[in-house]
């Protein structure tokens, strides 16, 4: 099976830079894939992406060595299995707040006897290779998003879930749940402490600690903090910022 290079990067203690795709376009996905990201995540929760567009984006990503991943809209076994069958090599699942949530997520991503994933890999077989069924459980990455106060309360039991590869902190939703605005993840001491607590607990278990960041400099700060996987903004925000900068520059006289 095609190896999941993110596993090797983590094993070698090298930073994983993950792109975030919210625009439902294979062309945008292809452009992003050629920029040097280690992985690219198609956002099916908040992104403007349907399943057919998502599969085309996976195909575009496959023109490079970047690893395709997806965030499903929810912890739905049917949706998660479909994304894996389409060729996703990792799942970043939102709103994992309990150990039961985490167990349900892992079960959806692993074939029996480890999990309850139904067999029918379709494009996953084409992308992964002929031994997909026997090797997929060891290659597919499973991340639980930590973005609720309940998740913090249940952090240890979530991290202890067999088959979970890591966490992915959603700092904006976490800040909102803690009574602050979505832009306060870098300014509110309680949120800063919560994010660090989640990171440390994850790293201490040898799991992959990931986090969404607003831009490149913020991602560098998170990497320096000790996060293993960072996402330096999403495509729409980066596109918007670049367009605004170009218009501003053009109006200068």
Image (cartoon, rainbow, N blue to C red):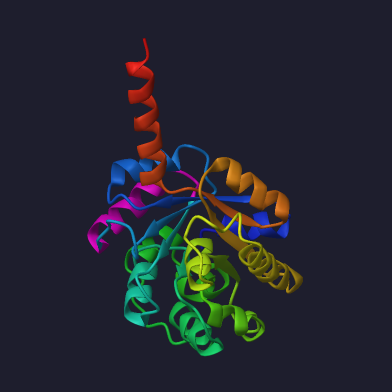
Q: Where is residue 210 in the image (x, y as percent from the top left)?
A: 59, 61
Q: Is residue 240 shown to the viewer in this render? A: yes
Residue 204 percent across, percent down from the top left: 76, 71
Magenta highlight: main SS: helix
Name which residue lies at 49% across and 48% down. Answer: 66
Q: Which picture quadrant has residue 160?
A: bottom right
Q: Is 123 placed left or right of 154 in the picture? A: left
* 2 horizontally vs 6: left or right: left
Residue found 58% across the figure and 77% down from its top: 164
* Image label count: 0
Question: In the depicted view, which residue is nearer to us: 222 or 23?
Answer: 222
Image point (60%, 72%), residue name: 165
**Left or right: residue 218 compared with residue 226:** left
In the image, residue 191 sits, relative to residue 246, either above or below, namely: below
Asked if residue 220 lies in the magenta stretch, the reply is no
Evaluate whether residue 158 shows in this view: no
Is 76 placed above or below 185 here?
A: below
Give the side of residue 113 with respect to residue 24, left or right: right
- Does residue 60 show up magenta in the picture? yes
Q: Which residue lies furthest to the top in this view?
A: 253
The stretch of residues the image draws in magenta is 51-66
**Quarter assignment of residue 245:** top left
x, y (%) of residue 182?
47, 59
Q: Is residue 205 above or below residue 71?
A: below
């Amino acid at each position: 099976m095609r190896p999941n290079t993110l596993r090797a990067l983590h094993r070698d203690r090298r930073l994983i830079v993950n792109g975030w795709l919210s625009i439902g376009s294979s062309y945008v996905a292809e452009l992003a894939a050629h920029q040097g990201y280690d992985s690219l995540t198609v956002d099916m929760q908040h992104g403007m992406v349907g399943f057919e567009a998502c599969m085309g984006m996976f195909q575009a990503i496959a023109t490079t060595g970047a690893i395709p991943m997806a965030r499903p809209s929810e912890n739905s076994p049917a949706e998660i299995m479909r994304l894996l069958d389409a060729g996703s090599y990792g799942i970043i699942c939102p709103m994992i707040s309990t150990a039961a949530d985490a167990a349900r997520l892992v079960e959806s991503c692993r074939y029996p006897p480890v999990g309850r994933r139904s067999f029918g890999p379709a494009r996953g077989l084409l992308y992964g290779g002929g031994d997909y069924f026997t090797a997929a459980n060891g290659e597919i990455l499973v991340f639980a998003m930590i973005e609720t106060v309940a998740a913090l309360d249940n952090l240890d039991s979530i991290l202890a879930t067999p088959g979970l590869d890591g966490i992915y902190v959603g700092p904006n939703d976490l800040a909102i749940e803690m009574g602050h605005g979505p832009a306060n993840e870098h300014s509110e001491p309680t949120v800063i402490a919560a994010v660090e607590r989640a990171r440390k607990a994850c790293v201490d278990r040898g799991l992959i600690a990931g986090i969404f960041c607003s831009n490149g400099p913020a991602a560098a700060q998170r990497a320096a903090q000790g996060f293993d996987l960072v996402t330096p903004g999403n495509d729409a925000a980066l596109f918007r910022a670049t367009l605004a900068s170009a218009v501003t520059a053009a109006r200068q006289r």
